[in-house]
Amino acid sequence: MSALLDHYEAVREEFDYDRPDVDIGSLSASLVDRAFVATTDTDALREADDRDTLFVASAGLTGTPHVGTVAQMYAVKRLHEAGLDTQFLLADYEKYASDGRDLDVVRSLADDYRTFLDRIGYGGEVRTQYDDRDVMQTAFRLAPYFEFEDGPTFDVEPTEWVEQLRTVYDDDQLTHDDATGATRFGGRVASLLCLADFLHPTVEDDYDQTVFVLGVDEHALVLANEYYTEKTPFEPAFEGLFTRMVPGLNSYPKMAKTIPGSGITMDMSPERVRRLVHEADDGATPAESTVYQMLCLVSEHDDQRLGELADACRAGGEEWDAAVAAYADFLADLAAAWPE
């Protein structure tokens, strides 16, 4: 996992991101720092209580969520429980437009995600692109400023972790039977709708700022939408808050919905989930332990308990073994909440 830790450092340095070791509402700085690896602006996080702020996480509907996807859900779940406005965006039209996925299949999957979010106790807003005509209207307002061939470029050397990820996607990524294939125009329409998703809360919904909660592997999405925004007459206010990655099983660089064998997914049987959690316990330090990183991202533990578990992880032995077994049961219960 050292390649992933090096990647975190490189991303912060290359893009001048801050480490998010600040309080967000009632969430302590140390708890935030355990779950998130970077932010575009710590001041935006500090001011979340004083300014009308919406925290938005999302999921591309390429399949059943794995623990990394559930981490995005738990990120906004924690923020909502801390008294902040949150939204979980189900990007259904994005996969329809960019990959030609069957719309009924994607919308059915969105329904399952919505049910799962409710069952795990998330009480914030959930929305789909399909149902939100107001955001589509914002997309049309942006369309005259959106060039088909235009796009940002980033002159940075890919890290070892990024190279590993690219190789995995080239070699092992699955395709969906219902996908008719991507078109360049469909991809640009999806990008336009994504830009509207970013701008709408502050341009039309009267929020002072929006904070987009993304996996650090998707951080460039914030930069891309900043680039497109500069070409419009609108003046939105949005920032990025980037979660840590869940290391993949079977030596994959991360868990991914389209890489079979890389993750613990919510459609697995509880027995299989328990087995995979125990197999993922590799005796590594907390920073490199797959199980400890999952605990930080997807659990109901507070910062004090996560600190105790970090100590147990370092020491190994019976206390850590018991914690791993308890967590295996916790994830198995989550999987049981996925709609059949």
Image: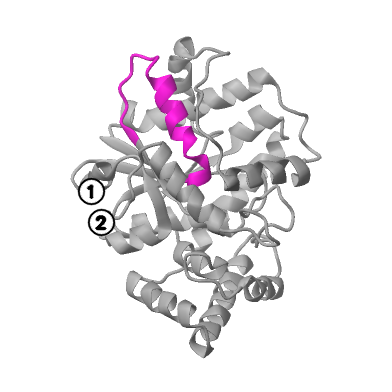
Picture residue at 24% right of the left edge, 41% below the top: 52
Q: Indicate left or right for 111 with 296 as reference.
A: right
Q: Are marks 1 and 2 in contact (CB under 8 Å)?
A: yes
Question: Taking 150 as reference, is 14 above or below it?
Answer: below
Q: Amino acid at mark 2?
A: Asp
Label total for image: 2
Question: Taking 214 as reference, is 3 above or below it?
Answer: below
- Residue 232 image offset from top left, x and y in percent: 38, 15
Picture residue at 39% right of the left edge, 61% below the top: 34
Location of mark 1 (residue): 46
Picture residue at 30% right of the left edge, 22% below the top: 235
- Residue 286 image offset from top left, x and y in percent: 47, 70
How busy is the neighbourhood of tag 2: few (under 14 within 10 Å), some, or many (20 plus)?
A: some
Q: Indicate left or right for 127 with 277 as reference.
A: left
For this rendering, which residue is in front, 332 or 206? 332
Is 230 magenta? The answer is: yes
Q: Mark number for residue 154? A: none
C-alpha gap between disc 1 and disc 2? 6 Å
Q: Amino acid at mark 1?
A: Arg
**Disc 2, SS:** loop
For this rendering, which residue is in front, 315 or 114? 315
* The magenta segment: 214-238
**Image quarter hosting the N terminus:** bottom right
Q: Mark number for residue 23? A: 2
Q: Residue 202 is drawn in which quadrant? A: top left
Is 204 magenta? The answer is: no
**Disc 1, SS:** helix
N-term mark: 1 or 2: 2
- Residue 183 image offset from top left, x and y in percent: 70, 22
How busy is the neighbourhood of tag 1: few (under 14 within 10 Å), some, or many (20 plus)?
A: some
